[in-house]
Image (cartoon, rainbow, N blue to C red):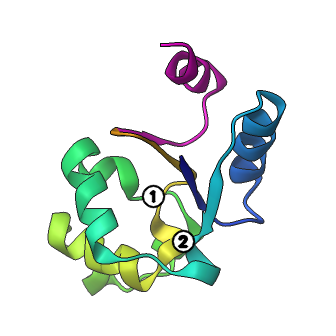
Amino acid sequence: MTLYGIKNCDTVKKARKWLETNQQSITFHDFREDGLDRASLESWAETLGWEALFNKRSTSFRNLSEDEKADLNQDKAIELMCSYPTLIKRPILVHGDQVLVGFNAGKYQELFTS
């Protein structure tokens, strides 16, 4: 099981604390330190849709040029997320074939009890 995110993100910290408290062993992958390959983003986009991964409310999105923000589609969004990992909603939990975006204690609990 791998938790993807940025270690200083408050939501990632909450997810890590929940997983630790509930005795779930994870590998943590920091987008900034460890990078992220396009194949992972493409796989998650196929599973969830790119819109679920792309954070339009982030400071990073607001700082994009108008050209970068215009005509977003899956390919363009993935390219932007590869270039600017802070555009990715966090955290992303990958457990087998399950992929969860964001932290929701109820959904995490459901994942580990099913």
Q: In the rendering, which numbered label is found on residue 23? A: none
Secondary structure at badge 1 equals loop
Query: Label 2 vs label 1: CA separation?
Result: 8 Å
Relative to 27, is 47 above or below?
above
Q: Quadrant of residue 31?
A: bottom right
Q: Is residue 108 magenta?
A: yes
Residue at 74% in and 46% down: 16
The amino acid at mark 1 is: Asn
Secondary structure at badge 2 equals helix
Q: Which residue is mark 1?
A: 55
Residue 73 in the image: x percent, y percent?
16, 65
Could you tell me if the residues under marks 2 and 1 are in contact, i.e. CB atoms within 8 Å?
yes
Residue at 58% in and 27% down: 108
Residue at 55% in and 63% down: 58
- Viewer-proximal residue among 68 and 43: 43
Q: Which residue is mark 2?
A: 86
Residue at 69% in and 52% down: 12
Q: Residues within 10 Å of mark 1 (few under 14, many from 20)?
A: some
Mark yes or no: residue 45 visible: yes
| Numbered range of the magenta stretch | 98-114
